[in-house]
Image (spheres, helix red, strand yellow):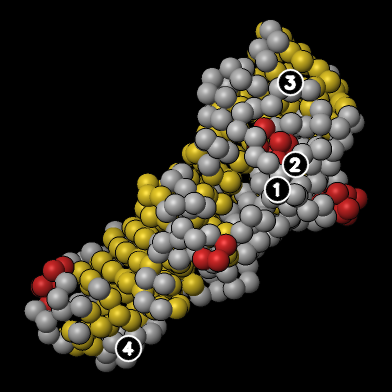
Amino acid sequence: MHFFHLIHFCAGALASVSIVDPSDVISPSLWAADNAIVPDYNVPFISVQPSPIIAAYTFDNSTSLSHQVFSTALNQTSVILVTGELNLSYSTIVKSGYASNLLESSFWGFNAAINVANASKAQLDNINVTVHNGAANIYVYGTDSVVYVNNAWLYSSGPVSHGVYASGNGTAYVSNVQHFSGGMRSSSFSGDSPAGYLYISDSVAHTTGIGSATFYALGDIYATNVVAISEQGPTVFMDGAQKAYLTNCETTAGLLGGVAIFSSQTRQSGAILSLKNSKITTLGSIPGLWFGNTIIDVSIDASELVTSGVLVVANYSQITQDFDYYADYSQQPNLQPAEVYVNVTESSLVGDLVAYNSSFISWSLASYSSWTGAAYSGFDEAYFDVHLDSSSTWTLTKSTTLQNLTDADETLSNIQSQGFNIYYNASALLNGYLGGKNISLAGGGKAIAI
């Protein structure tokens, strides 16, 4: 059985609550061969939605149904296609049969169990959807298309078998959903180009395939009260200037990072990551937050990052097509250093900041936050700013070189050095209050002008 642990403190006792997901009902071992299929994306990209969308059942007007069973085993065929408006409740949908083109299946929702097409609407309540062979559970496409999913059980195997997938400016509202996927690149809640807008609440997600995130953000992700584990993927996978807001979420990530956020082409600015009252745990040696070839604003409010020692990485890099490791310049010649601006409030964080190849991290602590850690270069030049308000503290674990050190407590008494030094740029304007002096820190170290 797979466990999601929600930790509660009560009268001094530590307790955990186990949360099940659909893989506790249908074992992934039954579909191991299906989940081992490697997606082939080396096919011509189709910039216009192919036509027609083939489905076993098409609803092109306003229809309400309940207590139904729909299925098909035909290849490249959805079970249900909505081209009008469908209200479906207390029903079961089963999809098997392969997609002849996994790019069409992933990007355009061909072979999906439920495909909500252009300018259509679906309300799905108390449904059970099972898909195999490479198919999304629920797919919505188009600016005027919206799907509401409430009280749903979603199981998928095979590659690109996303749980709820919004694309082409489509919107999905998801609540009280349990999702499992075992295939590669099969995220639980996904948006795709040009954007997908997803609002997820009170849900459970579990993925086991390589590159399968909990949230795949191309567009906006708003998640509240979600418990999830991505065994071989990050919690958030984001490409470009997208936005992800996690509130009251507890997630675990097993590959790339707690989040893996980058620009796959030219470096973009405007990306946002927000963690509020949330916790991300990483497995193995991966960092809490990883950023490459992007400019992003990050807020961490009353949240935790539980890692093996690295909180944030900023790099001159991106992710491979298979979402399995960090790529380099030889695979993408448009790379630039990452710029990461992190604001921490009401949080206690332990771990280091690491920047590579001229990347930059700005790290601001406010509202009674604390940080135990250091900042250093992983390779070549690296740049860091650290900002502290008077209520926040920093405990050094290694000597650190900064461009800017700003502290509302100008005596730096809220820094515990443990014998380590801070080297700051005496020429930087924000450091003017330090007067270019060497200042003794609590614990035996110094702030040294360079």
Write the residue at 67% across / 15% down: 83
For numbered disc 1, what is the local secondary structure? loop
Quarter containing the C terminus: bottom left
Residue carrying label 4: 420
* Drawn side of residue 272 relative to residue 317, left or right: left
Circle on res. 52: 3
Residue carrying label 1: 41
For disc 2, the neighbor class at 10 Å (few under 14, some 14 to 19, many from 20) is many
Q: CA distance from mark 1 to mark 4?
A: 49 Å
Which tag, 3 or 1, sits closer to the chain's start? 1
Please tell me which residue lies in front, 11 or 201. Answer: 201
Confirm or deny contact between disc 1 and disc 2 (CB under 8 A): yes
Asked which quadrant contains residue 65, the reply is top right
Which amino acid is tagged 3? Pro
Residue carrying label 2: 102
Q: CA distance from mark 3 to mark 1?
A: 22 Å
